[in-house]
Image (tube, rainbow, N blue to C red):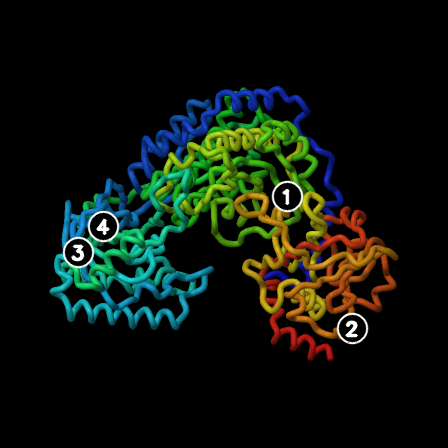
Amino acid sequence: MRRRLQGLAVAAAVVAAALALSAVPSAQAPGDPFVDRIIELGTKDNKTLVWNDYASNRFGGRETGSNSYTDAALWAVWQLKQFGLDARLEKAGELPVGFNRGPWFGKMLKPTEKALRFGTPSFTAGTKGIQRGPVVILRADPFSIPGRAQAGRPVARENVEKKRAAVQAALAEVAAKKAAFKGAWVLIAGASSGFARDGRRGSKLPDGSPEYLDAEMMPPLTKALIDAGALGTIQSATPPSPLQPHQNSEPPINILDGFVASWDALPVLPDIKLLDAQYKEIEALVEKGEPVVLEFDIRNHFKMGPIEYHNVVATLPGTAYPDEHIVIGGHFDAFSSGTGGVDDGSGFAPGMEAIRLIAAAGAKPKRSITFIGFAAEEQGLVGSQAWLKQHPELHPKIVMMINRDGSPSAITGATVPETWYEDFKAITAPLASLNPRWPFVLARGVPRAHATSPGGTDSSSFEMVGVPTLNFATSSARIGPDGKEIPSYPYSYAWHTTNDLYSELVPYAEHQQHSALVTAVVAYGVANLEKPLTRAGVYLADGLYATLAIGSGEETRQIMTTLDYVNAPLATANFVRIVEGKAPAPAGRAGGPPPGMGFGGRGGRGGPEQKPIGQVLDVKDGLVSMQIVSDTQKSVAVARLPRTLNPKLGHDAAGVLGLSGPNVFYLTLQKKSSLNRRSAALGTVIAGLSHLQDLKKGDTIRAVRITRVGDGARDFKTDDEAFAKLLGAKK
């Protein structure tokens, strides 16, 4: 852990200096013929959906460890070589056993005949041909008790004991009614998460506890059911999204994966996840004593390992700085309950097309542009982690990483650090009027926290080693067959579900093609800068920060300051509390982000306008005075605060944040040394300093976001107990 005081000082000094020294743009000159050619090709001969069609429909669900993934990766390398690129496979890992999914069928035979909507997690057992039998209910319920570690924290001891006791009850029930389970399909309790009944994998946390408790506790119950002669288990699966009238007519079911440790430990008992409405219907019939007979034919197949899997990598070498790279990424794998048309066909295919457009245009960028189709993203960002581990020498040489992993949307803009703004303004100028549906809007952003552990998508792997990543804004709005606007694509309709199909993308063909073209123009522009993009002002150093959103609509201004919790703990705690209340909001995103603030994520411009939480009281005498008045603020309001000073930070420049009352604060417009003996300085502005001159009396404060980076900031408590101690210590 860094020393707290040192971290705060460095955070403020480095970022502020970087913003002050941001240089004039060095992008390619207007009218670059290669940009014009890229746009011409991307407009008239865009092949984005061709690459998705091959991967999704010619090879099928690209499950890591499957023949489909291996074959699709070989094709992708061949295809990228046809573009004239240096393309290759780079090993990402291996599995002890492979998995290949065949077709699956199921129906109710009695009391009436009807088709069943279901799936099975990958790496789980299929049936032994066509198998039919009655239905019984297992009453004991170890399945509803949470058993997965969250955010690196072990499963709660209470849940461990509850689950252990419930498993024992289920074992006793099977032993007591063994004859009833023979030759029967067993309804088990709980709502399916999509993962396998017997756990996803046997991975351990640093303290030795299991990541997936089911992997440790469920196998004995499964064995008991097998020994009793059960045909398989059936669990209820609730659709993660309602039916969409203009999409696939079948309800989506989350179907993810299990794990097989070795060939001699192949799963035997099928693990069926059945549409909740049908599950409830069957359960009700059984409860009434009516005989129910089901039939399933599930063709899940395995392959002896070890099975290697690879990242797909292709490079267009730079002409002046070939060791510097712009990386375009998207994961190439998918869960095999679908075909990966959306997740992540909507990501890798535009990336693959982007690098083709650049190469086909004959462009010779100064820096190398590398496309990576990552393996095993769905298993925990394995492919991106492996690639970075194999290429540590490239970490400081990767200028920027563009990752696409989300809905089949069109890129509509980007939020970039102030230190990048002028370069991006020149690079994206041709995109402003490229398509009237999606004019490119460039926004200034503030420095952000970088990922410290793998999570979400492959860009986090790059953030972990300090590589700058670019966040595009996107839109998936379109006009439906009835002429009415469909405002957005419901990503949960396809994400990790049986509806993750190429057909989901067809209505969004233009969105996909536009995104490929925008990616190509931006990647080429960054690769062709005279000087590489700076890393200054991109990520935050360890510390505590506040980002204020002041104004409304397109006039919203972002101002980011440090918060000196080390030298002004009481005042800082009070400021955080009037924003967040008694406890931090999830991920520290109290009060925001409001529309257009560009706080990161998978894209998009945010939701509806939020109710303001405060306003600018006055602008005079070198100060901008502001006040927070909200329900949150009122819930933690104090009548007065003891006067405190900051021994390490004075009011010696513009952009100093200070507290002048329990819910009143200010930002200096100039040096105000007279305040040093009257008020506690809380921090200094590190982004948006120029916006201070634009603020005026009556401007609304739309939101304030508190960001914690590093253990010290995360350990700074502002709950009632901690705040009371700070008050008591001061008194």
Question: Which residue, given by chain and number where applicable, does mark 3 sit on?
Answer: 292
Sequence-first tag of 3 and 2: 3
Would you identify the image quadrant in which residue 306 lies?
Answer: top left
Verify CB contact (< 8 Å) between mark 1 and mark 4: no
Expressed as whole percent of the image width and height from the top left, the position of residue 231 reads 17, 55
What kind of element bears circle 2?
A: loop
Residue neighbourhood size for the residue with mark 1, other residues' Cα within 10 Å, grouped as few (<14), some (14–19), many (≥20): some
Measure the alpha-carbon separation of dots 3 and 4.
Answer: 23 Å
Q: Residues within 10 Å of mark 4 (few under 14, many from 20)?
A: many
Q: Amino acid at mark 2?
A: Arg
**Mark 3 vs mark 4: which is more N-terminal?**
4
Report how far apart the C-alphas of labels 1 and 2 lie in the structure: 39 Å
Q: Amino acid at mark 3?
A: Val
Query: In the rendering, which numbered label is found on residue 125?
Result: 4
* Residue annotated with mark 1: 535
Spatial CA distance of label 3 from label 2 is 75 Å
Taking the spot 42% from the left edge, 32% from the top edge, the residue there is 506
Q: Residue at x 18, y 50 (%)?
A: 112
Between marks 1 and 4, how big is the CA–CA gap? Answer: 49 Å
Mark 1 or mark 4: name the one nearer the start of the chain: 4
Per the model, the C-alpha gap separating discs 1 and 3 is 64 Å
